[in-house]
Amino acid sequence: MITITIPDGETFQLQHLVLDMNGTLTVDGSLPEGVSQRIEKLKNEMDIYLLTADTFGTGAKVAQELGIKMFTVSSDNGTKDKADFVSSFELSEVVAVGNGNNDVEMFKLARLSIVVIGEEGCSIATLTNADIAVTHINHALDLLINPLRLIATLRR
């Protein structure tokens, strides 16, 4: 679990990292350099899950490479599937990372939501429901590896 306290007194206890795959964790179904090493560090602190409709058919390979659990969501109803998945946890312990319209509802539920504005861009709805916006998945993961960055970004 990652615990951070924001200077205004709010404390986050983050246990579950839920990652969208396409456009967030991967680019065209492939992992960018440096992601595997960051996930490996975070696995000691958090439970990590990959949620994907598996557009490129590489979800199982990516999950296996990272040593994390993958859950397939419906390409027609992924928004609900992702929200239902996040709802299975204590919401105050969830970090959600995504970029698409089908991530909006899980962003609304998660304690902390990070939108990745990468090569695929991000939906405006997801951006406006995020707590933090970054330009690369490695930046999102680094916020969790180096919690002082989260404090600097979220302090009032």
Image (cartoon, grey):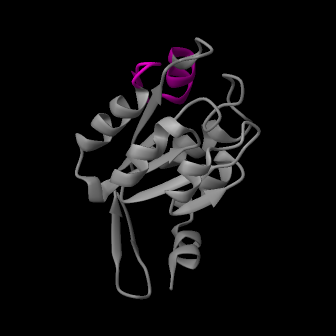
Residue 57, visible in the rendered structure: yes
Residue 82 image point, x, y percent? 37, 34
Residue 44, visible in the rendered structure: no
Which residue is located at x 70 percent, y 48 percent? 136
Q: Nearer the viewer, residue 22 or 78?
A: 78
Q: Nearer the viewer, residue 45 or 115?
A: 115
Q: Is residue 114 above or below residue 106?
A: below
Q: Is residue 34 above or below residue 65?
A: below
Quadrant where the image shows the N terminus: bottom left
Which residue is located at x 46 percent, y 45 percent? 104
Residue 46 image point, x, y percent? 39, 48
Q: Is residue 111 above or below residue 53?
A: below
Q: Viewed as shown, does residue 86 lie left or right of 102?
A: left
Number of numbered discs: 0
Q: Nearer the viewer, residue 78 or 31?
A: 78
Q: Viewed as shown, does residue 79 lie left or right of 31?
A: left
Which residue is located at x 35 percent, y 86 percent? 9
Q: Is residue 78 magenta?
A: no
What span is colored magenta in the figure?
A: 60-77
Rendered image quadrant of residue 106: top left
Residue 125 image point, x, y percent? 54, 49
Which residue is located at x 56 percent, y 31 percent? 21
Q: Viewed as shown, does residue 43 lie left or right of 61?
A: left
Q: Is residue 70 magenta?
A: yes
For this orientation, the residue located farthest to the top is: 57
